[in-house]
């Protein structure tokens, strides 16, 4: 898209302001509103931000501005906010791409793929909770009648929030984003909207756009759209699974091979990639499950519906939803991640792990087509299967000590991420919860 075409596009759609955007280390959208008649400045001079005011940029108040140079190919209307559009861009400092800008981190991994003539295609599946805060401060499903013990795919649960779901879906569809499924998930008040796959950078940009739309449309309806990984201990959490494959310059899926002896349609390249993901599962988890709350979802155990649906086992299998990696024929699905993840960082780390598996020709071993939830810890161990980190402290320690992640994502980034997350863990660990008061107040 040229500047002239972009100006016409904004004028035809009555756009008055363009949000120049980037995301912080947590994956939260940050913006400045720029009047539409200053569009050219976004893509030439860029838009300046005080980097010290944003988590994770590692910029001090006395240092140069963090400048976002707009990418016209990302110029997108915001149908839920008439008169507004948004544009993502490249975060720079003193004219150079900032090395710990999370979108830049993903682009570096995509460049490594491009050097081989490859493109990473991903389909990211966001789960979320539609909630309402009551006058007493409690939080309940927005649909008060959504109370079934096993509510997955329930018609009434889907129908009674259709105003919200339709508005979000139709906003995305009007932008050319192909939404192909909407469903009620396994927890009360939990839903999922699925988009068609795209290249990894576009997928991450779309997730941010979707979160913006969902949050604002929910707010207008008096609801809260929450991407918190585990809003309630007795219910399943909000995952964000990543389906992925690598394609060549002709668009051929290099992960697919119909002659796969295991019957999963995977190529040797895909097996090597999968082996890399499994080999680096523990540090990878820090980017896929990046909050204290993530590890309330990522546990072995049961919920009110009968299962957590959160895979903690470092294994892969044919359509096995109890393993970290599921194989839905001819591609892989990484199921560890939750809806609190930064999609740029999660995909960058996944690519780094997978490429290491390809470069070293790692073998993932035989597929594990067993219900891990039904096995005892001893039975899992007998199969040589490890479990993922069970706390934020454990996963960030694995990330800090990972030579691969330090090299691929950047040692400065890893240090910044670990520092922030360690502070989060310490703050949480020192907090006295209602559970502790209830259990210990008069116990001793």
Image (tube, grey):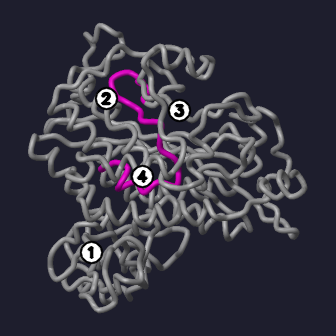
Report the front residue among 415 and 326.
415
Residues rendered magenta in the picture: 325-348
Quadrant the N terminus occupies: bottom left
Name the residue tied to disc 2. Answer: 274
Name the residue tied to disc 3. Answer: 311
Residue at image position (14%, 33%) is 359
Q: Secondary structure at mark 4?
A: helix
Name the residue tied to disc 1. Answer: 70
Please tell me which of labels 2 and 4 falls first in the chain.
2
Report the front residue among 43 and 230.
230
Q: Is residue 420 above or below residue 122?
A: below
- Calculate the distance from the C-alpha at mark 4 to the C-alpha at mark 3: 19 Å
Please tell me which of labels 2 and 1 falls first in the chain.
1
Residue at image position (64%, 34%) is 308
Name, please, the residue furthest toward the bottom: 62
Q: Secondary structure at mark 2?
A: helix
Local crowd at mark 1 within 10 Å, few (<14), some, or many (≥20)?
many
């Amino acid at each position: 898209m040229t500047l002239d075409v972009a100006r016409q596009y904004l004028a035809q759609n009555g756009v008055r302001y363009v949000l120049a955007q980037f995301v912080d280390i947590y994956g939260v959208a940050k913006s400045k509103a720029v009047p539409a008649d200053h569009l050219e400045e976004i893509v030439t001079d860029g838009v300046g931000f005080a980097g010290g005011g944003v988590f994770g940029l590692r910029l001090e108040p006395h240092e140069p501005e963090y400048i976002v140079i707009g990418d016209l190919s990302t110029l997108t209307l915001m149908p839920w906010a008439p008169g507004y559009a948004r544009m993502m861009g490249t975060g720079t400092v003193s004219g150079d791409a900032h090395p710990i800008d999370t979108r830049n981190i993903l682009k570096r991994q995509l460049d490594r793929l491009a050097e081989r003539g490859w493109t990473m295609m991903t389909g990211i599946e966001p789960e979320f909770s539609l909630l309402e805060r009551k006058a007493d401060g409690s939080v309940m499903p927005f649909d008060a009648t959504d109370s079934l013990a096993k509510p997955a795919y329930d018609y009434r649960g889907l129908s009674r929030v259709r105003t919200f779901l339709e508005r979000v879906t139709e906003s995305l569809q009007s932008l050319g984003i192909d939404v192909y499924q909407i469903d009620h998930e396994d927890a009360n008040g939990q839903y999922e909207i699925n988009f068609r796959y795209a290249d990894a950078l576009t997928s991450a940009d779309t997730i941010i756009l979707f979160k913006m739309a969902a949050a604002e449309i929910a707010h207008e309806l008096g609801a809260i759209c929450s991407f918190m990984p585990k809003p309630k201990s007795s219910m399943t959490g909000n995952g964000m699974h990543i389906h992925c494959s690598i394609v060549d310059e002709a668009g051929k899926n290099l992960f697919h091979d119909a002659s796969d002896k295991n019957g999963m349609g995977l190529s040797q390249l895909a097996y090597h990639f999968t082996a890399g993901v499994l080999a680096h599962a523990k540090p990878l988890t820090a980017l896929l499950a990046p909050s204290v709350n993530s590890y309330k979802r990522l546990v072995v155990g049961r919920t009110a519906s009968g299962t957590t649906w959160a895979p903690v086992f470092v294994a892969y299998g044919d359509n096995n939803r109890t393993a970290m990696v599921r194989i839905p024929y001819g591609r892989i699905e990484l199921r560890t991640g939750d809806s609190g993840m930064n999609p740029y960082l999660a995909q960058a780390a996944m690519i780094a792990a997978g490429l290491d598996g390809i470069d070293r020709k790692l073998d993932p071993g035989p597929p594990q087509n067993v219900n891990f939830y039904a096995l005892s810890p001893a039975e899992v161990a007998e199969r040589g299967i490890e479990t993922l980190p069970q706390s934020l402290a454990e996963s960030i320690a694995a990330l800090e000590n990972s030579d691969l992640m330090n090299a691929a994502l950047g040692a400065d980034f890893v240090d910044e991420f670990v520092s922030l997350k360690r502070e989060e863990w310490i703050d949480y660990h020192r907090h006295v919860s209602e559970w502790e008061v209830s259990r210990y107040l008069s116990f001793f």
